[in-house]
Structure formats: structure tokens, C-alpha cells
Image (cartoon, grey):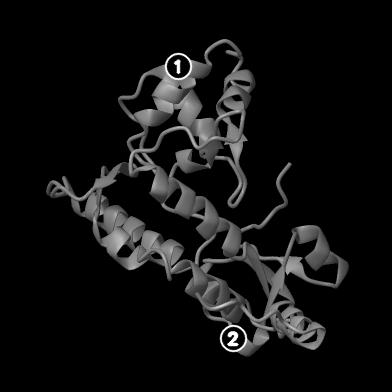
Amino acid sequence: MTTPVPMTREQIDQSLVAHFRPVPAGADLTRRVLDRLRENRSWERFAARIDVEASDRGVRLVRPGGGAGAPPSRAAARLAGRARQELHEYFAGRRSFFSVPVDFTGLRPFQRKVLALTHRIPFGETRSYSWIARRIGRPDAVRAVGTALGRNPVPILVPCHRVLRSDGGLGGYAFGLDAKRGLIGLERATPVLEGCATTGILCRVGCPDAQRMRDDSRVVFASVADARSVGYRPCRVCRPADPE
């Protein structure tokens, strides 16, 4: 067995400088971090296994590939296509929110309430099953919350992967725990906000206006407050806001 050669202090300093060097373009930051994630997971193959079904009101089903049914109308087909595009951008690290609507029609009131709250969990953050139970006014219904999330018909769009056990454990997930762990890591590596240095406008990553920015004009921000402090103003299209 070969004995590893320890790094010199100079090599360590150079490595740290390279790792934490300023990144002027949000796209470059995303690329650098996601390249590391993709060493262990092919999100392209994962996305290809997902079927999407929609009604005229919104997406009603996201599931592992099994042959999506024919859309009931042109409006439903457009919404399903829009969802697939947004999912593709999400997996590529180019989207930090979903704008396509979801359709909770037909769900029981308790599950609808659980999913509506889960839908509002901020990108890149996590909550616990007990947190959801308390917020919906049913603190003793933690197990029922888990069941409702386990039957989530629109995973990823309604981010039940952001819900963990109180002890930090993953809990369950329709696509498997490896996928849940990977999605949490993907979101933590994807920038949420980016501003355009030439216009002074701040967008959520994935906004149509943000997608038209030149790469050398993109500036990544940690919060809306940070962006405002240096003169950026929130986009009127995607309306970025800090979590409450």
C-alpha cells in the first residue's frame, strides 16, 4: 500500500484559494459545484425516468417512468411540457423554483393542507414532519403527515424531499432515499438568486429574464437583503423575496 504524501502548507493554501476564489458568474458557480455532484449521479438519466401528467388546472402527477397517459386537452399538454422543461432546468442547476401550477383536485382536505404547506418550503431548506404537523394545527398527527407526504402525487414540484425526521433522518421518499439525499444536495449547491450587473435587477435562478442575462453579467447573491444593500431591485416577473 502506498503511503499518502502529506500536503505542504503552501499546497494547502493554494487549494483553499482555488476553492474559495470569487466567482463572477452564477452559471460558473453552478457548473463547478454540479460537476462534482454528477460524479456520483446522472440527473439526466434520473429526469428521463419521470412521467408528468397534467389537467387544465395544473400538474397532477409526477412519478417514476411507467408511460404517462394521453393529456386530456391542449392546455394540459402545454402544462405537462412546461413542467418537464422546468424539471430539466432544475436538475441542470439552472432553476431554483417552479412556476408551473399544481392541481390538488381530488385530494382529501388533510393531505391538501399538508401538501400546500410543503409547497412553500423554501428552496434549499428543510423542515421536519413535526414542524408541518404543528403548523397545520395538528401537532399529534406527525405519522399522518408522513403518510400524506408519502402519497404526494407531485413529488419534486411539491418538495416533500425537503421534509426530514426530527432527528435529521431522511424518512421516506417515492423515488428512494438515495434520490432524496441527492436532491437535497443538488439544491444546496444551486444558487437561488442572481442579479444582472448591467441592469441592477435581481432574479430567482430560472426566471425567464435571468435566462437572458450574459454570463459575464451574472452576480450570485445569498439573499434579497444583500442584493438591495448594493443597489439591486427585485425582478417584477419572478418577485424574489427572502424567506419569512
Seen in the picture, residue 238 relative to 51 is either above or below; the reply is below
In-image side of 176 versus 50 (left or right): right
User: Tag 2's secondary structure?
Assistant: helix
Q: Residue at x 54, y 35 (%)?
A: 169
Residue 141 vs residue 121, the one in the foreground: 141
Q: Residues within 10 Å of mark 2 (few under 14, many from 20)?
A: some
The vertical placement of 74 against 154, above or below, is below
* Residue 156 visible in image: no
In the picture, measured across the screen, residue 21 lies left or right of residue 43, that is right
Q: Residue furthest front?
A: 1
Mark 1 or mark 2: which comes first in sequence?
1
Q: Residues within 10 Å of mark 1 (few under 14, many from 20)?
A: some
Residue 236 falls left or right of residue 211 = right
Q: Position of residue 155 (x, y in %)?
A: 38, 42
Q: In the rendered view, tell whether residue 220 sits above or below residue 51.
A: below
- Residue 69 image offset from top left, x and y in percent: 13, 46
- Disc 1 residue type? Ala
* Closer mark to the observer between disc 1 and disc 2: 1
Residue 24 visible in image = yes
Q: To which quarter of the image does residue 201 belong?
A: bottom right
Provide the residue designation for mark 1: 144
At a point 50% along the width and 64% down the height, the residue shown is 95
What is the three-letter code of the residue carrying label 2? Asp
Residue sitting at the far right: 229
Q: Position of residue 143 (x, y in %)?
A: 47, 17
Look at mark 2 in the image and give the residue it sits on.
215
* Residue 10 quadrant: bottom right
Per the model, the C-alpha gap separating discs 1 and 2 is 46 Å
